[in-house]
Image (cartoon, grey):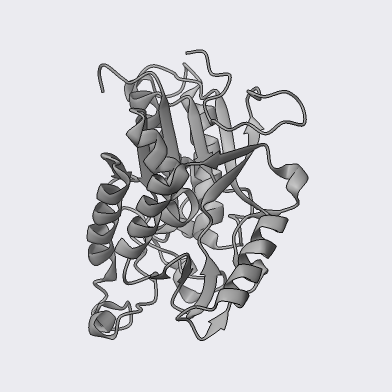
Amino acid sequence: MTDLPARRLLLVHAHPDDESINNGATMARYAAEGALVTLVTCTLGEEGEVIPPALAHLAPDREDRLGPHRVGELAAAMTELGVTDHRFLGGPGRFRDSGMMGAEQNKRENAFWNTDVDTAAPHLVEVIRETRPQVLVTYDPDGGYGHPDHIQAHRVATRAAELAADPDYRPDLGPAHTIAKIYWNRVPRPVAEAGFARLRAEGSAFPAVAEIDDVPGVVDEDRITTEIDAGPEHTARKSAAMAAHATQVAVDGPFFALSNDLGQPIFTTEYYELVQGTPGAPAGVRETDLFAGVTA
């Protein structure tokens, strides 16, 4: 990729829809500001449950055509966010959705969870060396909530960042590149509590309310280093992108539900924990820009 923009952001996610739920407003903001926003999705999400009855035939225990359908949903979501650079790790379908932790699908030969990290990481090294991001966003070591593909996405992203910086590793994949800042997705517990309180007070189309423990990446406030308030326009883009993932997500105004039909708040400000790199704000002050302090 030639003539790269001055700011370059890479996000690594496990399945289609994870990016819109976790980072949709952030992605929309930086794309609108002219940054190169690159999304790498590690699986097609083939093992997801299907919300609309008319699409139930796509499910993995029926026609097993959910993955290709979700490719189209992800493309529609990226259009909503204004993101033009999206790739599947190793190409569409290289690694299959592993299902929930402990499921039989974890053990399939091509399951992402069942893939050696050093087998998957070179595909991401190639993307890193091509797009040369200053900022990487992914999950924490628990994957936010323990899903095997999320844990594996963290491992692969972390390993690929390390390998991409090593000039002796696979020079055929491009010149070495060091990512300046690495972030994990987070939600501060007080923000989650306030969002669920609002949901209970206002009500929604969903019959019940999820628990805070159902929200990936909830941590105490002191873990948060960075908050991105993308404004109402980009928040609306986030909601539209989430709705584009119609097999997985139902949106009702400021709230949404997954296939369990349990309401959750849509977070309009998105939060991060800087885990590698130099903070771009004084101690005790949160960054308001993922690129804060980045000089090149």
Along the viewing direction, whichever of 259 and 111 lies nearer the viewer: 259
- Horizontal placement of 73 versus 24: left or right? left
Is residue 27 visible to the viewer in this orientation of the structure? yes
From this view, report whether residue 84 is shown above or below residue 5. Answer: below
- Horizontal placement of 56 versus 185: left or right? left
Q: Residue at x 53, y 42 (%)?
A: 229
Q: Residue at x 30, y 54 (%)?
A: 77
Residue 156 rendering spot, x and y as whole percentages: 50, 43
Is residue 119 visible to the viewer in this orientation of the structure? no
Along the viewing direction, whichever of 73 and 103 lies nearer the viewer: 73
Name the residue at the top extreme: 295
Residue 198 found in image quarter: bottom right
Residue 154 rendering spot, x and y as whole percentages: 55, 46
Instruction: Please state, as top left, top right, bottom left or bottom right, where the N terminus lies in the image.
Output: top left
Along the viewing direction, whichever of 5 and 196 lies nearer the viewer: 196
Residue 213 found in image quarter: bottom right
Q: Residue at x 52, y 52 (%)?
A: 152
